[in-house]
């Protein structure tokens, strides 16, 4: 039996009515042909869906600074034509015959990772994001600034009721990036946590930590952000232009979460940690240097992490739904994609951009 869905000819197998196999599918998106170029309309063809894959009609897609870094080939890994977009919210329109946890018509989200091997030690222990064979949504494949996206079903995470679809995209990259350290380090509601930077990552970290029950301090080079930081969830605000401010906070925090991509006075921040405290880095700072004595004497540590596993993303969405945590977003139509990139390049968003199909 065959039917048309969203402009795609589908065949339904009698063995599994949930499985839909596209006979042919044209994807219409936006691509850059070279580094730093504006994006232009671009089409490509997808073959038959794999047994463990899903096809998604894109409804919304967040614009992350990593999209800009990939567009400009800052990491020397971009393949052109390049279709950005790795904060996808959409509707399932096709599933492979082995897929059972999502159904056609269900709303799902996809983040930085589009597939992993599922059999290595990392995947088998629930750390899929560290799989050596993991494939990024925009790394060597076409991303979500398009009308459709295909990915491995494991990474298509169902979106629970209570999560606003229009603003949910950034949760699948920035959101999980700042949420997973709370799980990784067993942060409790009694913990004191400092967040360095109030931007695309930091503003979500403040909201999550406040809802988590922690005592939250925001660190920023911008004193004018204090009022907004407190509204987002900070109990305290520290202007890092005050050179003595960090000295006065010695031994106060269980964790410092660094969300900025610049080098800091690492030893000063390590000094603010309690015994066994952790300085956790999610911003891509070039290098980190610290005195070993800081680490040894009080058993402090410096750690970092990428995004998160499918399980962690699922837990984050559940938490966000229960506590009504959502990113602050600005919205553009997908056809305004170059305007949105220019807005991001100029550092103007407060705090994340979402494009609507």
Image: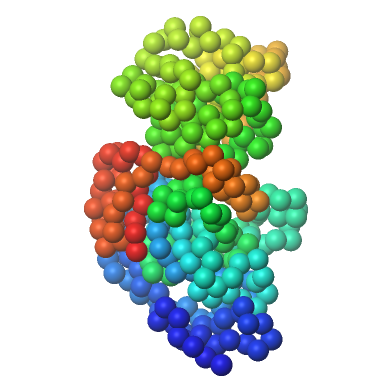
Q: Residue at x 69, y 20 (%)?
A: 276
Name above or below for residue 60 compared with residue 17: above
- Which residue is rendered at x = 39% and y = 11% of the image? 242
**Model colouring:** rainbow
- Please tell me which residue is depicted at 53% across the width and 54% down the height of the picture: 161
* Direction from residue 239 to residue 104 in the image, left or right: right
Q: Residue 32's quadrant in the figure?
A: bottom left
Left or right of residue 190, residue 232 in this image? left
Residue 25, above or below 37:
below
Instruction: Residue 302 in the image: state x and y as whole percent.
Output: 61, 27
Identify which residue is drawn at 34% across, 64% down. 357
- What x and y, as percent, mark residue 153? 60, 66
How many labels were placed on the picture? 0
Q: Residue furthest bottom?
A: 1
Check the image and report above or below for 157 versus 29. Answer: above
Q: Is residue 322 visible?
A: yes
Q: Nearer the viewer, residue 276 or 215?
A: 215
State which quarter of the image contains the N terminus.
bottom right
Query: Where residue 158 appears, x then y in whole percent?
Result: 57, 59
Q: Position of residue 68 (x, y in %)?
A: 36, 49
- Residue 79 appears in view: no
């Amino acid at each position: 039996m065959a039917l048309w869905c969203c402009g795609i000819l589908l065949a339904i197998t009698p063995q599994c009515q949930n499985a839909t196999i596209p006979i042919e599918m044209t994807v219409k998106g936006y691509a850059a042909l070279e580094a730093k170029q504006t994006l232009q309309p671009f089409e490509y063809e997808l073959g038959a869906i794999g047994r463990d894959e899903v096809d998604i009609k894109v409804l919304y897609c967040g614009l992350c600074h990593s999209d800009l870094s990939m567009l400009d080939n800052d990491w020397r890994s971009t393949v052109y034509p390049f279709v950005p977009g790795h904060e996808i919210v959409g509707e399932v329109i096709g599933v492979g015959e082995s897929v059972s946890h999502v159904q056609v018509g269900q709303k799902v989200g996809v983040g930085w990772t589009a597939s992993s091997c599922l059999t290595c030690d990392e995947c088998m222990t629930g750390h899929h994001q560290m799989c050596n064979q993991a494939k990024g949504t925009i790394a060597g494949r076409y991303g979500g600034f398009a009308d459709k996206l295909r990915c491995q079903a494991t990474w298509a995470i169902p979106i629970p009721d209570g999560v606003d679809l229009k603003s949910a995209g950034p949760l699948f990259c920035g959101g999980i990036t700042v949420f997973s350290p709370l799980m990784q380090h067993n942060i409790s509601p009694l913990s004191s946590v400092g967040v360095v930077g109030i931007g695309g990552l930091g503003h979500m970290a403040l909201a999550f930590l406040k809802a988590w029950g922690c005592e939250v301090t925001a660190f920023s080079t911008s004193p004018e952000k204090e009022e907004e930081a407190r509204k987002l969830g900070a109990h305290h605000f520290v202007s890092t232009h005050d050179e003595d401010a960090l000295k006065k906070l010695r031994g106060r925090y269980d964790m410092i979460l660094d969300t900025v991509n610049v080098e800091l006075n690492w030893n000063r921040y390590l000094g603010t940690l309690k015994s066994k405290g952790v300085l956790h880095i999610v911003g891509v700072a070039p290098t980190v240097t610290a005195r070993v004595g800081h680490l040894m004497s009080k058993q402090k540590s410096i750690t970092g992490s990428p995004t998160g596993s499918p399980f962690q993303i699922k837990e984050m969405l559940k938490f966000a739904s229960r506590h009504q945590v959502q990113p602050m977003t600005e919205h553009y139509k997908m056809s305004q994609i170059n305007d949105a990139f220019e807005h991001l390049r100029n550092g103007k968003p407060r705090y994340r951009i979402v494009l609507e199909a």
